[in-house]
Amino acid sequence: QVQLVESGGGLVQAGGSLRLSCAASGTFFSITSMGWYRQAPGKQRELVAAITSGGSTNYAEPVKGRFTISRDAAKNTVYLQMNSLKPEDTTVYYCNAKASVRSGLRNYWGQGTQVTVSS
């Protein structure tokens, strides 16, 4: 099993910055990728950014140029630096990890952290 602990959400004014962190722990062979998703009320969860174990990154169009995902492989931790935040970025952000465990490749989610951007 893999546990994901998120931190760093909060309230910020438009144009401001926040940094989200997510640390993975538990029993696993390896983590193939980690990322951040967000889900607004009544909408599907959508990818914000992801990074593979090889360092390849993928960003959703609305956040390109504003958000940067990075990782510390030694700490099994992923970060999301969010700059130039907009009110439409307001929602709950979830950390995701795809990990190789005894039963195979599995998907894990954090509990979510609220990001609120005021106009």
Image (cartoon, grey):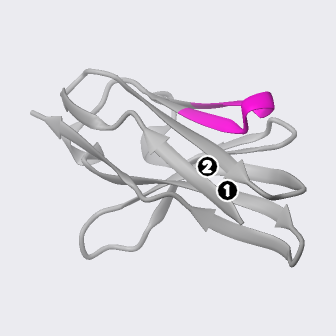
Q: Position of residue 53 (x, y in %)?
A: 83, 43
Q: Nearer the viewer, residue 41 or 63?
A: 41
First in sequence, mark 1 or 2: give its number. Answer: 2
Name the residue type under label 1.
Ala
Q: Which residue is mark 1?
A: 97
Name the residue type under label 2.
Gly
Callout 1–callout 2 Cβ contact below 8 Å: yes
Quadrant containing the N terminus is: bottom right
Residue at 38 percent across and 24 percent down: it is: 83
Q: Is residue 1 magenta?
A: no
Label 1 packing within 10 angstroms: few (<14), some (14-19), many (20+): many
Residue at 66 percent across and 36 percent down: it is: 77
Residue at 68 percent across and 60 percent down: it is: 2
The quadrant where residue 52 appears: top right
Residue at 80 percent across and 29 percent down: it is: 74
How many numbered circles does the render carry?
Answer: 2
Q: Is residue 74 magenta?
A: yes
Q: Position of residue 31 (x, y in %)?
A: 80, 52
Q: CA distance from mark 1 to mark 2?
A: 7 Å
For the residues carrying marks 1 and 2, which lies nearer the camera in this image? Answer: 1
- Drawn side of residue 17 relative to residue 111, left or right: left
Query: Is residue 48 in view from this perspective?
Result: no
* Residue that lies at the very extreme toward the front in this rendered image: 26
Q: Which mark is residue 80?
A: none
Q: Nearer the viewer, residue 1 or 37?
A: 1
Per the picture, the main secondary structure of the magenta-coloured stretch is: strand
Magenta residues?
69-79
Q: Position of residue 94 (x, y in %)?
A: 46, 55
Q: Position of residue 41 (x, y in %)?
A: 24, 69
Does residue 94 sit above or below 12 in this rendering? below
